[in-house]
Amino acid sequence: MKILSIECSASPASCAIIDDGKLRAISFINAKLTHSQTLMSMIIGTLDNSATRLADIDRIAVAVGPGSFTGLRIGISAVKGLAAPTDIPCVAVSTLDGMAEGFADRDCVVCAVMDARCNQFYNALFDISGGVITRLCEDRALLGSELKDELLKLNRNKDIIICGDGADLFYKTISEIEGVNLAPEHLKWQNATGVGGYAYKNADTTDVISAEKLLPVYLRLPQAERELKQKTAKSEE
């Protein structure tokens, strides 16, 4: 099975081709360019440089959130454009599931964090033992102080690894906790290899959907909608 995977939920953008569980090609950029500038050229280049035709792809996996509202829309729109003409099946992958996949070869607890602004983090916790990844909670948005308290109360006998685009920011508040480590740079960021790896490993249990059914998962309303909701509520008081 060949899977084209796409990840642009935060500042990095990446795409990868997973061929029967093995990484065949990858392109990654974190240069603060907009995904609308880089994503499609990355995808085309990755396909061309690996001698892979779009017709060879069995599924397209994409990180659908949580994450940047604009980034998620760009990634999902790209997948729709690629998949719809020939009805390539699609797989919607949680951004946080994709991050945990990068540590499947370690025994640890993964704390995947994304900067949600206002001292909040999109987060999920995963226990990894013997290559098996077990979710400890659903995707959620938490205050940094709430997540810190949760980690302090966690019953564990293994190290915690902090990863994601919010890792550096969150780690500053918990670096004094014993056994908590910041992920190395090459594993810290969201990456399409994790998205594709998750889709491949869970191919038998994950729903495959059409491109038109792909939707972003925000966890909370975009800022513009939140502000409008607040203004509407005040006007009705």
Image: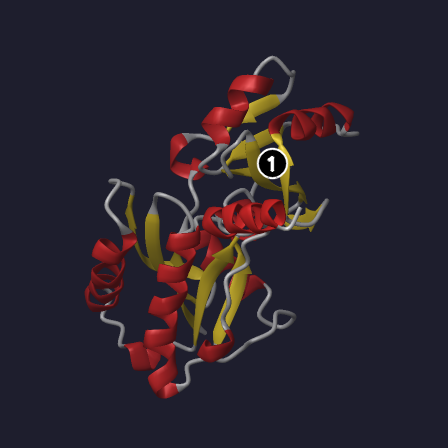
Residue 90 appears at what percent x and percent y?
Answer: 47, 74
**Residue 109 found in image quarter:** top right
Say which residue appears at 73% left-offset and 29% top-offset: 150
Q: From the image, tell me which residue sits under label 1.
A: 111
Q: Residues within 10 Å of mark 1 (few under 14, many from 20)?
A: many
**Residue 76 found in image quarter:** bottom left
Residue 194 appears at what percent x and percent y?
Answer: 47, 52
Q: Is residue 30 above or below residue 53?
A: above
Residues 151 and 20: in front is: 151
Q: Is residue 139 above or below residue 4?
A: above
Q: Is residue 83 left or right of residue 106?
A: left
- Is there any visible trace of residue 81 in the rendered image? yes
Say which residue appears at 50% left-offset and 62% top-offset: 216
Residue 27 appears at what percent x and percent y?
Answer: 28, 53
Say which residue appears at 54% left-offset and 37% top-offset: 113
Under circle 1, the secondary element is strand
- Looking at the rendered structure, the number of numbered marks drawn on it comes to 1
Q: Is residue 87 left or right of residue 111?
A: left
Q: Is residue 101 left or right of residue 186?
A: right
Residues 12 and 18: in front is: 12
Q: Is residue 26 above or below residue 177?
A: below
Question: Please, what is the three-letter code of the amino acid marked with disc 1?
Answer: Cys
Residue farthest top in this picture: 176
Residue 148 appears at what percent x and percent y?
Answer: 66, 25
Quadrant occupied by the N terminus:
bottom left
Residues 37 and 22: in front is: 37
